[in-house]
Image (tube, coloured by chain):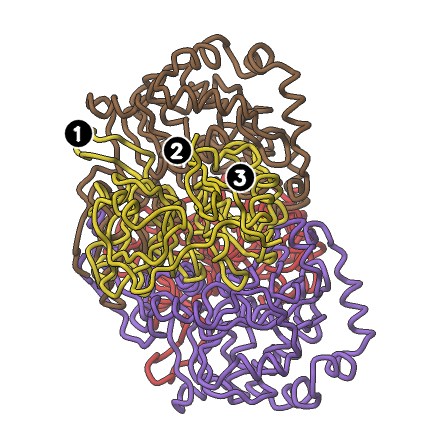
Chain colours: A brown, B purple, C yellow, D red
Amino acid sequence: MRILEEGKADYLKVDPDGYRASVRDHKPHQMVSKLMTHKEAVERFVRDGDYLAYDCNYFQRGPSSLIREIIRQRKKNLWLCGKFTYVACALLVEAGCADRIDIGFIGFGPWIARAVREKKCTIYEYSNAVITLRLKAGAMGLPFMPARSFGGTDGFQHSGCKIVEDPFTGKPVLLVPALNPDVSIIHVHQADEFGNARVFGTGIAHAECALASKRVIVSAEEIVATDEFRRDPASTSIAHFTVDAVVHAPFGAYPGTVQGYYASDPMGVIEAMGAMFRGDFTEYLKKHVYSVQSHDEYLQKVVGTEKLAEIRRRETIREGYAS
Amino acid sequence: MRILEEGKADYLKVDPDGYRASVRDHKPHQMVSKLMTHKEAVERFVRDGDYLAYDCNYFQRGPSSLIREIIRQRKKNLWLCGKFTYVACALLVEAGCADRIDIGFIGFGPWIARAVREKKCTIYEYSNAVITLRLKAGAMGLPFMPARSFGGTDGFQHSGCKIVEDPFTGKPVLLVPALNPDVSIIHVHQADEFGNARVFGTGIAHAECALASKRVIVSAEEIVATDEFRRDPASTSIAHFTVDAVVHAPFGAYPGTVQGYYASDPMGVIEAMGAMFRGDFTEYLKKHVYSVQSHDEYLQKVVGTEKLAEIRRRETIREGYAS
Amino acid sequence: MSTPATDFNEREFVICQISRLVDDKYIYWVGGGGEPMNSVLLAKRMSAPNLQYLTEDGCVGPEARVPFDPLMTMIASPANYRALQWGTMNYAADLAQLGYVDYGILATLQVDRYGNINSTVVGKYEGGEGRRFGGPGGADSIAALAWRTILVTDQQKRKFVERVDFISSPGFLDGPGARERHGLPPGTGPWRVYTPWAMFGYGADCQLMLQGIAPFVTLEQLLEEMSFKPAIAPKLEILEVPTEEELMILRTQIDVGGQVTDRGRWIELKDGKYRFATP
Amino acid sequence: MSTPATDFNEREFVICQISRLVDDKYIYWVGGGGEPMNSVLLAKRMSAPNLQYLTEDGCVGPEARVPFDPLMTMIASPANYRALQWGTMNYAADLAQLGYVDYGILATLQVDRYGNINSTVVGKYEGGEGRRFGGPGGADSIAALAWRTILVTDQQKRKFVERVDFISSPGFLDGPGARERHGLPPGTGPWRVYTPWAMFGYGADCQLMLQGIAPFVTLEQLLEEMSFKPAIAPKLEILEVPTEEELMILRTQIDVGGQVTDRGRWIELKDGKYRFATP
């Protein structure tokens, strides 16, 4: 099984044995309540220098309120998992929180471009599917996973992937290194106090993020009783023992949508995209992050109850988004 | 990435490119009706010499009526995927249908033992999880998948697995060869005429079997409208394009249970287990297979409406088994 | 109903071209938004009511409720409405890896002679000096795994180049056999490239071949907007303009806010000929 | 409530031993049926009401409705009742591979000095000459991946051997470091072996060490039912007999039909001593 070709970039160290030990020693195997505020969850479980994965993005059932809290707490030197995302990476880089990004797809904008030129930010290249496959390998406790894509691209050269001779077919096959983030933040429809959680509708890699990450913060639109999970166990997307913190975050994905619960706020989306394209989030951060102390205060003072009522009203499709 | 150790047994050839071509050329990508009888489905899609996977088993939401039909049609030289199963392999070997078995767990009994001694049946060794992981690799279009189990066992020596030096960590890691069965038979709670299908409750590898197999027969307790799937797309376990035939098979898992629909028939279970332990299915086959022409006739003449009503009545738990 | 339109713009033109290829016998993986998504949404309302398409969030065969809010082409209830199955990203990639995706439809920034796709950087990659874009996203998987890839891009010299500055998603790389040497499945690759002015296929040498041209441009105009001269099919097809019905559906149901189509130049029928409208 | 019982059988004895180890702080993966399943079902009703166990069909934390119909320990509604999550077999294996399974509980046919497990063949493998059994099933994954494995087997010479005829599921293989050399995760392996007569642990040499003995057998009797002489702990523990409450729950709620416990010899308290009942 010869190695035929290797990407030349750094990647988060592959260490399934270390990850296992961390699961044994640090994950809350017992059912204990993990309800806490945004502030406490981010203080306790997001650390400077962490590899951070957020599932979905700032506009589509993403943990937007947790992203704002991370910025508010001025976390530093994060390494971001930039899959399927528009503005969140740019926000975190511009706010001084992140300096490395694994890229599947992100909204780049002039600010990150400048940070890269000034060597304040390093980029590693993947695709959305290669990154989620890396998370899948991490979520299965494996060191790597084969894939039939990504070979032959220039991105490959700037990645941690390898092409080897498949010992079963003799043909070249690509291997992606497993990814076990230090911390994942995931926004869900419902959770109980222990961290059992439900996502309704399509998604990116919420289950993989929860299983693959050393620490997991779940923010939830609704906190429900554990009995709700027990009466429909097939709908449990994330099991409690993978989760470290549960944050009640109604409208946590704002300005984005949570399918079946509320629509996106198109003006809020355009405001954020516009700031990214201009390469200047100064005003945006001031208004949407620094002007308030908490997500609750943000909803009250910045977004306003009228807007919240409006986006809830605009979401008219309910089918499929309940248990 | 050196190969450190290799199992010495035959295994179904690993050929992801060939499988892709078969998906392109033979799978019904279009939505077309596939409703047919047990007889037609088995005639058209189970062929002598096939590698056959059945999901679950004769007692637990398994395709028992399809297994009986395969025996009735006296298929030959099947290679069985013997994971998580009690009597089905023994039935198929004793009926003269199968001569090779990949073993995770099967009810062995004296008959298979004799067939092995007489070289009429060849056994290859795996574990339940290794076989379902092989199916998972097959269901992802990959040639292999790493695993952290099975190394160091004597089974490994009689398998198609390999241990290689992991190119990411330098440590030994096991690789399982992907499994793409020629045909899978899967029993589900609900299907539409196109093959979209739902399994409620826990399972073994129904989704993997459907995705990994060249031909797929789904038998379903209920045939429902496609609109049922469209109003709750999260509950779709199997997508139509993976499926070749849909067979309406109420009580298709008898004498086994279908969770939420009917309980097992303990006397039917014990009758089959007893025959297996004795190593003589002659009477069993005569009564339960050869005495009738079809599953409908079997339910009417052999099982009887009273028994069917009884096992339905005995299944008192409904929670979680509906969409 | 199928009256040729007399006024339309470039983007509407290309969306209608692609839309007409779409057939409900096949399974499509459609890139995020823009022309690819609009093409299939239009096809579903025109010729392919049972259309089965897949998006990156693992949504199989939705009956999307249009129009969409900005960017809400995935993980949003109108885009995912009445699907046959809801999955996640790894599921979409698995289906493509298994060979279930007959056609992939993608928009791109820059394409080259071999159909290689650049959505990463225009200019130099090293040091961040070039103009940087968002990366391959889902396009790499589509381009690697769909049996046939349909690309849509602009007809501009800097977007149609001899060699892309960065291969984000694979075309034929550097020619026959190259995809397989890098582990990609055989039998896959670029199939068509559409621009608002033209349609290209590929020769046996894996290089772009001009096969069709819009009635409102000349071959000379077209070649001026390419950095290299492609092979030209012996019989060059004149592409048919949108019909009134296509445009009505596109404008009133799908791209109502003009999010996708507002950027193109306008074409009009004047004196029996299609030409760019004078502003 | 915790009155020591005066009449019980060997299997009830061993089920109660294992049951008392179970703690709802940890996650367990429980083998198919028999003693392992009965142990956790009993524990959930005695000391560990929030017990979280996992079965091979991906069932997480059920509140099983007992008693079960024959063989219906998985993929059956009473066994899967009110679980926290329903998955499938690969999900169960993933959780174990990730290190979530603190303890695995398994029954086996034959075990050796290093805790290796045989559920494949007694006698010669080649040519099918030995007596053949069903294979490892889920036990291989549990034995390979759980941090600590608790085994239960019979106390019989042919089941307790120097070297198993076939390693179906790994113990310590041939000693320290062997598991890791074959790709198994470090820090895992056999932890306890229970029989109806005794409890064994492991020394630093990865070999079985007798740690506890039932009050109704002597050390001599015990060693006669082993093919090799194990190390013996300096202080040999006398295992406590079942309590009346444990037996009542086991007999009236869990193993009502005696499916699991009907095979053992009976023990009675006579003249202040526990001994095998004379039939």
Q: CA distance from mark 2 to mark 1?
A: 25 Å
Q: Measured from the top left, where is residue C1 in percent x and y?
A: 63, 53
Q: Is residue B259 left or right of residue C60?
A: right
Say which quarter of the image contains residue A198: top right
Neighbourhood count class around disc 1 (C-alpha, 10 Å): few under 14, some 14–19, many 20 upward: few
Q: Measured from the top left, where is residue B288 in percent x and y?
A: 68, 84
Q: Which label is found at residue C127?
A: 1
Q: Is residue A196 visible?
A: yes
Q: Measured from the top left, where is residue A137 in percent x and y?
A: 36, 48
Q: Quick one: B299 or C107, which is closer to the camera?
A: C107
Q: Measured from the top left, where is residue A80 in percent x and y?
A: 34, 30
Q: Which residue is mark 3?
A: C75
**Sequence-first disc among 1 and 3:** 3
Residue at 51% x, 65% y is B29
Q: The residue marked by circle 2 belongs to what chain?
A: A
Q: Which residue is mark 2?
A: A53
Label 1 is placed on what type of residue? Gly
**Could you tell me which secondary element the residue under label 1 belongs to?**
helix
Given the current orientation, which residue lies at the most extreme right position? B306
Q: State whether residue B286 is above or below residue A21.
A: below
Label 2 is placed on what type of residue? Ala
Label 3 is placed on what type of residue? Ile
Q: The residue marked by circle 3 belongs to what chain?
A: C
**Could you tell me which secondary element the residue under label 2 belongs to?**
strand
Q: Quadrant of the C terminus of chain A?
A: top right
Q: CA distance from mark 2 to mark 3?
A: 18 Å
Q: Is residue D270 visible?
A: no
**Could you tell me which secondary element the residue under label 3 belongs to?**
loop
Neighbourhood count class around disc 3 (C-alpha, 10 Å): few under 14, some 14–19, many 20 upward: many
Q: State whether residue A126 is above or below residue A248.
A: below
Q: Is residue D267 left or right of residue C238?
A: right
Q: CA distance from mark 1 to mark 3?
A: 35 Å
